[in-house]
Image: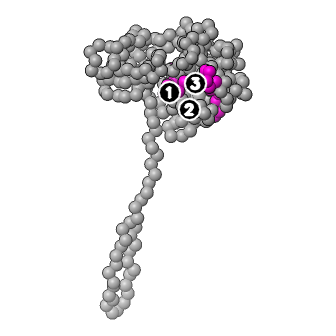
């Protein structure tokens, strides 16, 4: 497999009330009336419900999915092929995957893995299979940091290398993981052992090297000196141990927010 993450590299390929006291005796005893204070309120701490994301994957038997501008439109605005051509490995394909951002029963609003970044539309529920997961990730460009949650717990936090500001910046926005690759040994120096392709694209590179579409990637690197710096052509570099941990646990369809 030839891995060409189009925005990657640095120029190469790329979750009880007490009882009253007893009385005694022979003579009658007058017992003063007692009052009982109301019980103190009980304070409980409830964990917030984990945030779940939903991935819509086109059903295998469907060769194209109609995308509507709204649920009331009689005709689709466009259609997307299923499977989709890979943006990271020319000649390969992947099932059309879309992130659900609104659920209206028979209709789902989804983020689309296409240009321009942030494209969305509506699909019929009957056209897709749905899967939920409780992972989410945040990339903070200024802090050179990625934080990944599983449910309400931090699963991982580490330093990352990001796009060279002013020249090949990492695109900001809400994306999701669409593909996962095992990188061939000859390319592991640049990309590490694993690489996720994201649904977003470089705003600078529309193609790169021997192919690809300028898709953003989240991958490892053997050059640890590049972590914590603005060095890449737009992709997000992690340690090889970090990307390996994610590759073994984080499902496709995980939301990845990239912000300043």
Q: Is 82 left or right of 2, judged from the image as shown? A: left
Q: CA distance from mark 1 to mark 3?
A: 10 Å
Task: Please tell me whether residue 24 is drawn above or below residue 236 in the rendered image.
Answer: below
Q: Which residue position is annotated with label 1?
A: 173
Q: Residue at x 43, y 57 (%)?
A: 43
Task: Please tell me whether residue 109 is drawn above or below residue 34 in the rendered image.
Answer: above
- The circle drawn on residue 260 is 2
Q: Secondary structure at mark 3?
A: loop
Q: Residue at x 41, y 26 (%)?
A: 100
Residue 62, image x and y in percent? 38, 11
The span picked out in magenta is 158-178
Q: Secondary structure at mark 1?
A: strand
Q: Which of the two residues, 173 or 81, is positioned nearer the viewer here?
A: 173
63 falls in the magenta region: no
Q: Which residue position is annotated with label 3?
A: 170
Q: CA distance from mark 1 to mark 2?
A: 10 Å
Q: CA distance from mark 3 to mark 2?
A: 10 Å
């Amino acid at each position: 497999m030839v891995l060409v993450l189009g925005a990657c590299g640095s120029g190469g390929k790329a979750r009880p009330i007490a009882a009253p006291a007893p009385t005694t005796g022979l003579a009658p005893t007058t017992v003063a009336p007692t009052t009982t204070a109301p019980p103190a309120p009980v304070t409980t701490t409830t964990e917030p419900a984990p945030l779940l994301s939903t991935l819509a994957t086109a059903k295998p038997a469907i060769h194209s999915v109609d995308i509507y501008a709204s649920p009331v439109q009689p005709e689709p605005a466009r259609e997307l092929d299923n499977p989709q051509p890979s943006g990271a490995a020319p000649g390969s394909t992947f099932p059309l995957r879309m992130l659900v951002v609104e659920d209206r029963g028979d209709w789902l609003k989804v983020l689309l893995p296409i240009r321009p970044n942030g494209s969305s539309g509506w699909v019929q529920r009957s056209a897709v299979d749905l899967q939920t997961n409780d992972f989410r990730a945040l990339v903070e460009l200024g802090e050179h940091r990625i934080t990944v949650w599983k449910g309400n717990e931090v699963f991982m936090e580490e330093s990352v290398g990001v796009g060279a500001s002013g020249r090949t910046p990492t695109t900001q926005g809400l994306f999701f993981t669409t593909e996962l690759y095992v990188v061939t040994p000859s390319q592991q120096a640049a990309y590490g052992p694993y690489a996720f392709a994201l649904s977003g694209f470089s705003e600078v590179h529309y193609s790169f090297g021997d192919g690809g579409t300028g898709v953003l990637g989240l991958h490892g690197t053997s050059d640890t000196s590049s972590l914590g710096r603005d060095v890449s052509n737009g992709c997000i570099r992690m340690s090889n141990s970090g990307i390996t941990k994610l590759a073994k646990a984080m499902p496709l369809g995980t939301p990845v927010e990239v912000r300043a």
